[in-house]
Image (cartoon, rainbow, N blue to C red):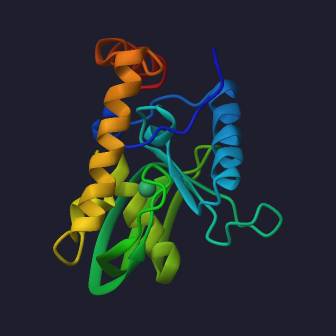
């Protein structure tokens, strides 16, 4: 199977609600390794599986953005509880390159998840990691940060988003990106393997 690739808006997998992971195998461990490589290559601090066209409830994060520094975190089947407070800050997304805007997020939360070895993770988090977690959790539900902008979308931003849509349409027409039915079939294949 081909290696993973970052997908960008408006790829339909970004709007797909990801399914819980029921099995972790050696291949999935390799895929998570590839996800970290992609995240560093594009200078991100978090990446959800569906951003590389894997429709499963898993995301990775490294708040330092630095491979040498860590920590490299993997969250499988994450759930958020006890979300409290509101804090507004600027966000970007590897699937919407070049776009930054302010988003309101909870200030602190508790995350429950599993790591790659099946160990339970239960942590109270806030600050930058808290923001990353909320952004990535949204991805797993098919929600993008542009759906949650603190202010009305400025015209320039709306035009950038429109440009992504036009480019995607053109690529799909030319065959550079597979048609939606084929993309749907790819998702089903992954879901049959891991969900
Ligand atoms: Zn994102």
Q: Can residue 18 be seen in this view?
A: no
In depth, the one of 97 and 73 nearer the eye is: 97
Residue plotted at (62% across, 30% down): 28
Based on the displayed image, in which of its 4 quarters is residue 67 positioned?
bottom right
Q: Which residue is drawn at 21% across and 67% down?
A: 155
Residue 4: horizontal and vertical position, in percent? 61, 30
Q: Residue furthest left?
A: 152
Name above or below for residue 89 compared with residue 123: below
Q: Where is residue 195 in the image (x, y as percent from the top left)?
A: 41, 26
The image quadrant that residue 133 belongs to is bottom left
* In-front residue for pair 157/50: 157
Q: Residue 157, percent across and down?
A: 29, 64
Q: Quadrant of ligand 1?
A: bottom left
Quadrant of the drawing holding the N terminus = top right
What residue sits 68% from the left and 59% below the top? 72
* Left or right: residue 153 compared with residue 112: left
Q: Can residue 90 be seen in this view?
A: yes
Q: How many labels does the image show?
A: 0
Residue occupying the point 32% across, 61% down: 145
Q: Answer with left or right where residue 112 lies relative to residue 27.
A: left
* Residue 37 placement, left or right of 136: right
Q: Nearer the viewer, residue 64 or 183?
A: 183
Q: In this view, does 100 lie above or below 142?
A: below
């Amino acid at each position: 199977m081909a290696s993973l690739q970052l997908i960008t808006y408006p790829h339909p997998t970004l709007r797909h609600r990801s399914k819980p992971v029921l099995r972790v195998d050696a291949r999935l461990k390799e895929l998570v390794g590839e996800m970290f490589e992609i995240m560093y290559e594009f200078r991100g601090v978090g990446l959800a599986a569906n951003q590389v066209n894997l429709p499963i409830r898993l995301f990775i994060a490294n708040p330092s953005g630095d491979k040498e520094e860590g920590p490299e975190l993997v969250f499988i089947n994450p759930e958020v509880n006890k979300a409290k407070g509101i804090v507004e800050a600027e966000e970007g997304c590897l699937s919407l390159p070049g776009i930054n805007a302010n988003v309101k997020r909870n200030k602190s939360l508790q995350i429950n998840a599993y790591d790659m070895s099946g160990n339970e993770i239960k942590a109270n988090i806030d600050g930058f990691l808290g923001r990353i977690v909320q952004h990535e959790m949204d991805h797993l539900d098919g929600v993008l940060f542009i759906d949650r902008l603190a202010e009305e979308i400025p015209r320039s931003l709306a035009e950038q988003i429109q440009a992504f849509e036009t480019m995607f349409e053109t690529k799909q027409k030319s065959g550079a990106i597979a048609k939606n039915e084929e993309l749907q079939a790819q998702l089903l294949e992954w879901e049959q393997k891991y969900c």
